[in-house]
Image: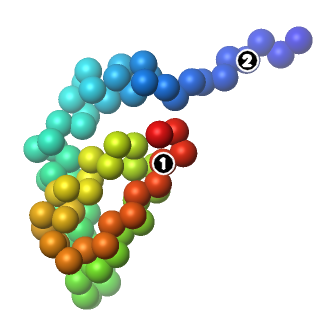
């Protein structure tokens, strides 16, 4: 009999690993989003116009990305939400 446990990525998991530890603190998320946007634009040598955020959770990167680039088109997808 296989006794391996299946991981549950539910609200309790999210709260434990993200909310409690401050990984999703707004200032930190904003810095990461701006850094990632600047890096992508540097590598592409053009402004980023569209973002597809796979595994976006609650879409925490949406607001900082749109604040940095108001005309940006953001689409977020997360199968667990």
Which residue corresponds to mark 2? 4
Placement of 45 over or under 55, stated as above or below: below
In percent of the image, x 24 and y 37: which residue is there?
24
Q: Nearer the viewer, residue 31 or 62?
A: 62
In percent of the image, x 48 and y 48: which residue is there?
78
Count neighbours of disc 2 (C-alpha within 10 A) and say few if under 14, some if 14 to 19, many if 20 or more. few
Placement of 74 over or under 33, stated as above or below: below
Look at the numbered disc 2 and give the secondary structure of its residue: loop
Looking at the image, what colour scheme do you see? Answer: rainbow
Query: Which numbered disc covers residue 78?
Result: 1
Of the residues under marks 2 and 1, which one precedes in the sequence? 2
The reply to whether discs 2 and 1 touch (Cβ–Cβ < 8 Å) is no
Left or right relative to 17: residue 10: right
Look at the numbered disc 1 and give the secondary structure of its residue: loop
Q: Position of residue 52 (x, y in %)?
A: 41, 66
Q: Position of residue 20 (x, y in %)?
A: 26, 21
Left or right relative to 77: residue 44: left
Q: For residue 14, what is the image quadrant? A: top left
- Asked whether residue 42 is in view, the answer is no
Q: Position of residue 81 (x, y in %)?
A: 47, 40
- Asked whether residue 70 is in view, the answer is yes
Quadrant of the rendering where the N terminus is positioned: top right
Left or right relative to 39: residue 55: right
């Amino acid at each position: 009999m296989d006794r391996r446990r299946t991981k549950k990525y539910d609200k309790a998991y999210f709260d434990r690993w993200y909310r409690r530890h401050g990984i999703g603190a707004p200032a930190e998320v904003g810095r990461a989003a701006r850094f990632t946007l600047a890096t992508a634009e540097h590598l592409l040598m053009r402004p980023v116009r569209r973002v597809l955020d796979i595994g976006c959770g609650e879409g925490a990167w949406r607001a900082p990305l749109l604040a940095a680039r108001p005309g940006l088109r953001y689409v977020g997808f997360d199968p667990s939400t």
